[in-house]
Amino acid sequence: MIRLKIWISALILFQQINLTKDLTVTEDYQQYDKGSQTVAEIFESPCITLSMNCTISSHTICYVCRSHIDGSSMTIAAEDRDMIFVTKNVMIREGSRCCRKHLEDHRLMPASINIIKPHKIEIISLKAGDVQMLINKSQILYNQKKRLDFDDCNAISDDEYYNLTSLNKGQFDSLIKEIAAFPIRNTAVRSIRTAVVCLLCKLRLGLSNTILALLFESPDKRAVSRAIGTARKAIMKDFVPYHLGISHITRRQIIDNHTTTIARELMGGGNDTLVLVIDGTYIYIQKDVVVVDRGFRDCLGVMYSLGLDVAMPPFLDGQKQFSTAQANRSRCITK
Ligand SMILES: [Zn+2]
C-alpha cells in the first residue's frame, strides 16, 4: 500500500514537472514571439551611429577625382554604391556627383573605381532596417561573385583581360560589339563574353577544357567545348572576313591608305598604281619558284591555281622518316 502511494506521488510529481516544462517552453515562445517585430516597428526602432569612410558629397566636386566638375555631372548607380561600400569600405552618399568621363554605360569604369578614396570619416546614423538592408546586399553580392566574371564590367581589370586573352578591355569590348549580331545564346552558365574569353584563353595559354571549366565555373569540359565552338563560328563569320585575308580590303583602300609616296615614286607608279611588298622573311622567290615553309600549307591550292611553282618541305604524314628523295628535296628547299 505504501509502495502504491509512493508510486502515485512520484507519478503526480513527474506530471507536474512535465507541465512546468511545457509552460516554460510556451512562455519562452511567447517571449520570443513578443521579441519579433513587424517591418514598421523595425523602421521605427532606435538608430545606431557608426563612423564611416565617406567620399566628397557635392553637386560641383567630383567624388572620384575630387576636381571641379566641368560640363554635366553624373550620379552613381545604386549597384556601384553597394559594390564600392562592400569591396572598399567607402560610402558614397546618395546624390553625390562625378564627371561624365568616369562612367561607361552609366556604370563606373574599373580605372575610376581604383582611384576612389575616402575623403573624411563621418558619423552616420543607421536604422535597424538600413543595417539589415546592408547585410542583405552584402550577401547578394557575395553569392553573385564568380571567380572570373567577364559580364560584370568592373570585376576584371585591364591587366587581367590582357593576361588571359591578349586583348585589353577596350579591344575585347570592340570585338564583342562586332560579333554581337551572331546569334549566340546567353545561358545561365555561359554568356557571349565568357564564350569568347574561353576561346581566346585557350589560344593564348593552351589550357585544357577541364582547366577552363574549372576557371570559368562551367559545368564540365563539354560545355567549354561547345562554348569555344560557338565563339569560333561567330568570330569566323562576323570578325575575321573584315580584318584578315585578301578580300577584307579593296584595291582603292590600299592605294589611298597604305601606299607611301616614297614607294610610289621609287616604283615609278602613278596615283593609280598599287605597290605590294611581300614580306621577305618567309617567302623567297628564285626565278619562278616560290619557296615557302610549312606554315603556307593551307595556301598551296591558291598558289598552284595562280600558276606558281611552289616548293615546300614535305610533311611526314604518319611515316617514321622521309624517303631519300623526300629528304633530299626537303634539304634543297630549306637551304
Ligand atoms: Zn572626376
Image (cartoon, grey):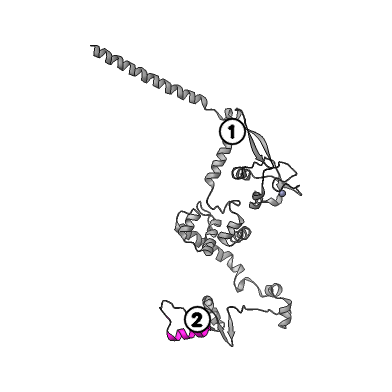
Q: Which residue is mark 1?
A: 129
Q: Is residue 60 left or right of residue 195?
A: right
Which portion, as a residue range, is magenta? 321-335
Residue 47 position by quadrant = top right
Residue 277: percent from the left, percent from the top? 65, 78
Q: Would you place residue 213 above or below residue 94 in this image?
A: below
255 or 182: nearer the viewer = 255
- Residue in the image at 59% along x and 84% along y: 285
- SS type, badge 1: helix
The residue singled out by tag 2 in the image is: 313
- Is 329 colored magenta in this rendering? yes
Residue type at mark 2: give it.
Pro
Can I make out residue 224 in this image? yes
Residue depicted at 59% across the width and 78% down the height? 281
The number of numbered discs placed on residues in the rendered structure image is: 2
Task: Give the Cα distance between marks 1 and 2.
Answer: 76 Å
Q: Is residue 6 magenta?
A: no
Q: Residue furthest top?
A: 1
